[in-house]
């Protein structure tokens, strides 16, 4: 399996508001930048879209390390929240419905095609790829600002 690193970030002005996401895929010294945005979204949706976009761009099963500053995304997998949500018919521990169910389900479909590890990093802390993703996500977000 190819070893791929996916660096991802999301940005939003207001919550909800205009948002953007960006992802950098790195494989064997080669990089690919992908980004996009929405006019009316949330930060968490943009964080999810970055990871989804990166994984959906892979053409074959890979050994993937996803690096993100989003504890929302990383903890959902590393702390097995996603497993619990599915078992409880997409309800959280407090009985409320899981937000962004559509994107979580879409993410699960692509995660299951690969061997995936999630790594959390601190945002705005000088990490080269995180900083680049942040700049790209903000550029995408700003396309929707009036």
Image (cartoon, grey):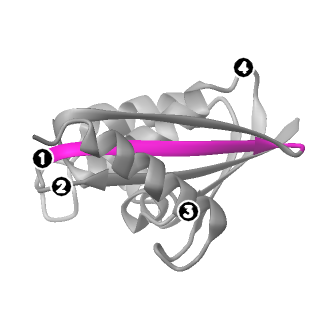
SS class, disc 3: helix
> Observer-nearest residue: 135 or 8?
135
- Could you tell me which quadrant the N terminus lies in? top right
**First of labels 1, 4 by sequence position:** 1
Tell me the distance, in whole angstroms, between the alpha carbons under discs 2 and 3.
Answer: 18 Å
Q: Are marks 1 and 2 in contact (CB under 8 Å)?
A: yes
Q: Residue at x 48, y 61 (%)?
A: 74
Look at the picture and state if 105 lies above or below 74. Answer: above
Q: Which residue is mark 4?
A: 59
Q: Which range is magenta?
A: 17-28
User: Horizontal and vertical percent for residue 88?
Assistant: 27, 47
Q: Which residue is mark 3?
A: 130
Q: Which residue is mark 2?
A: 13
SS class, disc 2: loop
Tell me the distance, in whole angstroms, between the alpha carbons under discs 1 and 3.
Answer: 22 Å
Residue 94 numbered mark, or none: none
Q: Which residue is mark 1?
A: 17
């Amino acid at each position: 399996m190819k070893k791929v690193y996916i660096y991802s970030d999301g940005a939003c002005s207001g919550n909800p508001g205009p948002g953007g996401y960006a992802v950098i895929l790195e494989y064997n010294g080669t990089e690919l930048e992908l980004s996009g945005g929405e006019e009316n979204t949330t930060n968490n949706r943009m964080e999810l879209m970055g990871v989804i976009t990166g994984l959906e761009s892979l053409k074959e099963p890979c050994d993937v390390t996803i690096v993100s500053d989003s504890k929302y995304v990383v903890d959902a997998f590393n702390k097995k929240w996603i497993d619990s949500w599915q078992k409880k018919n997409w309800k959280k521990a407090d009985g409320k419905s899981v937000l962004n169910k559509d994107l979580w389900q879409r993410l699960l479909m692509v995660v299951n095609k690969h061997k995936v590890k999630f790594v959390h990093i601190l945002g705005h802390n000088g990490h080269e790829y995180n900083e680049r993703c942040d700049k790209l996500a903000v550029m995408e977000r700003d396309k929707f600002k009036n």
